[in-house]
Image (cartoon, grey):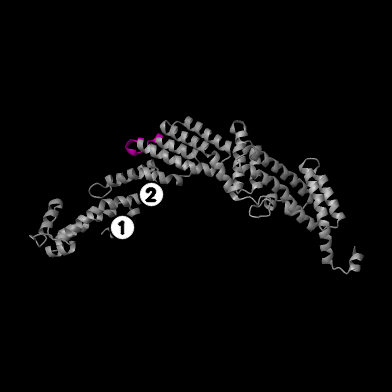
């Protein structure tokens, strides 16, 4: 070959080109025939690879060139069955789709057996190399995203239908995952389809557990409901995240039901135990339950704060510990109760501040000034000195004269007695109110 190259005056590049041009069709014919024999189960992978390698060496074809050719032939070998499968999907022939996908999967396994003998690193991750949906030249690159997802969904649901009692065995689950890789379906999309297909069964178990445990909680009942949910999760191989997401919804329903049946809206010890059992059953964290407790029990806590304030707005020390116990029974977070505390203070003192503001204006301003400030006629000024306001405040609080203004201001000072944790926050809000 070297002598011929010198006689013809060919460069190494020209020689390689001429050899590849002549040898490629011959090698392709041999390789395709060998692969078809393996796919038809008439020859072993070892025999096919030996035949392909012998032919490559006879044709003096570089290994790098044969590697590219084999990659192209593998994609063609898988692309044909997938194209045929997609035709059945378009006419909703689910049985044919299922059978053809299994045949394509067997072809994939046969091709992997051949490629494993090559020892080429590029072929170690078969799905990434040959089944990349974003590569138009890959085995599934000609399929649209919705077509690939439809094929996967059909295979998924039909696998469960064909299973015994609807249970997915380890072998079935592994096959589903193999089909997922063959079709280039992402983990997230596979999760979406699994939830759509099997999620309702888990939801039924969660709803039943919620209703029965809230209605008549016992530790034994909770244990049985836990088993039902665990069995459903295992049966359909759904993720823990799905259970937590659904569990948060059903937990909120349980809180709503308990808030309606609880005495004065405050859960009993048994009711809180029922909620604790549901929280554990649904694998949800305490932080995920806070919103439901605040929605249904927050108003109870706020009402208790207002009652503890009484008419003076001062919470006595012995009532503070009772409020802390109530917070625990209601399952409220400390940061939520702080906000409720501030809202209660605002609700208590907004009317008081408005009333005090009106009385101070009546005390300090004459009739004309009042009319200008309030934008309406304040009537005849019988006591320009403010004695009308003095009389009203004296009647209610027993102070008179110059002590009136001082007393009005002092009325707001008990807000500082609500507790050291809210004193600073309250004064900021008090400034807005005044």
The total number of labels drawn is 2
The answer, for residue 177, to whether it is visible in the render is no
Residue 328 picture location, percent across and down: 39, 43
Q: Which residue is labeled 2 in the image?
A: 336
The residue where tag 1 is placed is: 429
Q: In the image, is residue 264 part of the stretch drawn in magenta?
A: yes
- Cα separation, mark 2 vs mark 1, equals 17 Å
Residue under the point 78% across and 52% down:
119
From which residue to which does the magenta span run? 261-270
Given residues 78 and 257, the one toward you in this image is 78
Q: Are marks 2 and 1 in contact (CB under 8 Å)?
A: no
Give the residue displayed 47% in from the left and 30% down from the top.
Answer: 221
Crowding at mark 1 (Cα within 10 Å: few <14, some 14-19, many 20+)? some
Q: Which mark is residue 213?
A: none
* Position of residue 396 measured from the top left corner of the image (x, y, whole percent): 15, 51
Of the image marks 2 and 1, the number of the one nearer the N terminus: 2
Q: Residues within 10 Å of mark 2 (few under 14, many from 20)?
A: some
């Amino acid at each position: 070959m070297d002598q011929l190259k010198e006689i013809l005056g060919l460069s190494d590049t020209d020689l390689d080109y001429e050899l590849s041009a002549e040898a490629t069709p011959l090698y392709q014919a041999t390789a395709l025939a060998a692969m078809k024999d393996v796919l038809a189960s008439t020859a072993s992978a070892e025999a096919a690879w030996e035949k392909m390698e012998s032919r490559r060496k006879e044709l003096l074809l570089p290994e790098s060139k044969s590697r590219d050719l084999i990659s192209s032939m593998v994609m063609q070998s898988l692309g044909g069955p997938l194209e045929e499968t997609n035709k059945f999907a378009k006419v909703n022939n689910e049985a044919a789709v299922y059978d053809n996908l299994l045949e394509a999967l067997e072809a994939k396994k046969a091709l992997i057996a051949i490629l494993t003998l090559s020892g080429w690193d590029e072929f170690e991750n078969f799905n990434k190399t040959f089944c990349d949906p974003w590569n138009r030249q890959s085995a599934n690159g000609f399929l649209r995203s919705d077509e690939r997802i439809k094929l996967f969904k059909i295979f998924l649901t039909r696998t469960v239908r064909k299973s015994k009692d609807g249970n997915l065995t380890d072998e079935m689950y592994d096959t589903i995952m193999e089909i997922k890789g063959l079709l280039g379906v992402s983990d997230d999309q596979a999760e979406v389809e699994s939830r759509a297909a099997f999620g309702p069964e888990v939801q039924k178990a969660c709803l039943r557990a919620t209703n029965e445990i809230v209605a008549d909680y016992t530790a034994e009942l909770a244990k049985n409901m836990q088993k039902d949910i665990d069995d459903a999760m295992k049966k359909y191989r759904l993720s823990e995240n799905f259970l937590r997401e659904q569990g948060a919804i059903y937990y909120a329903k349980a809180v709503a039901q308990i808030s309606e049946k609880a005495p004065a809206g405050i859960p009993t010890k048994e009711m809180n135990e029922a909620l604790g059992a549901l929280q554990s059953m649904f694998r949800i964290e305490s932080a995920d339950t806070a919103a439901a407790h605040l929605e249904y029990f927050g108003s109870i806590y706020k009402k208790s704060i207002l009652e503890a304030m009484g008419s003076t707005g001062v919470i006595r020390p012995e009532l503070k510990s009772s409020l802390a116990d109530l917070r625990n029974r209601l399952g409220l977070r400390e940061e939520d109760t702080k906000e409720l505390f501030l809202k209660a203070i605002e609700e208590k003192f907004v009317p008081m501040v408005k009333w005090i503001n009106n009385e101070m204006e009546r005390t300090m301003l004459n009739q004309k000034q009042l009319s200008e400030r309030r934008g309406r006629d304040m009537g005849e000024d019988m006591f320009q000195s403010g004695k009308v306001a003095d009389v009203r405040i004296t009647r209610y609080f027993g102070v008179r004269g110059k002590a009136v203004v001082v007393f009005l201001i002092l009325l707001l000072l008990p807000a500082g007695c609500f507790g050291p944790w809210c004193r600073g926050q309250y004064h900021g809000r008090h400034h807005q109110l005044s």
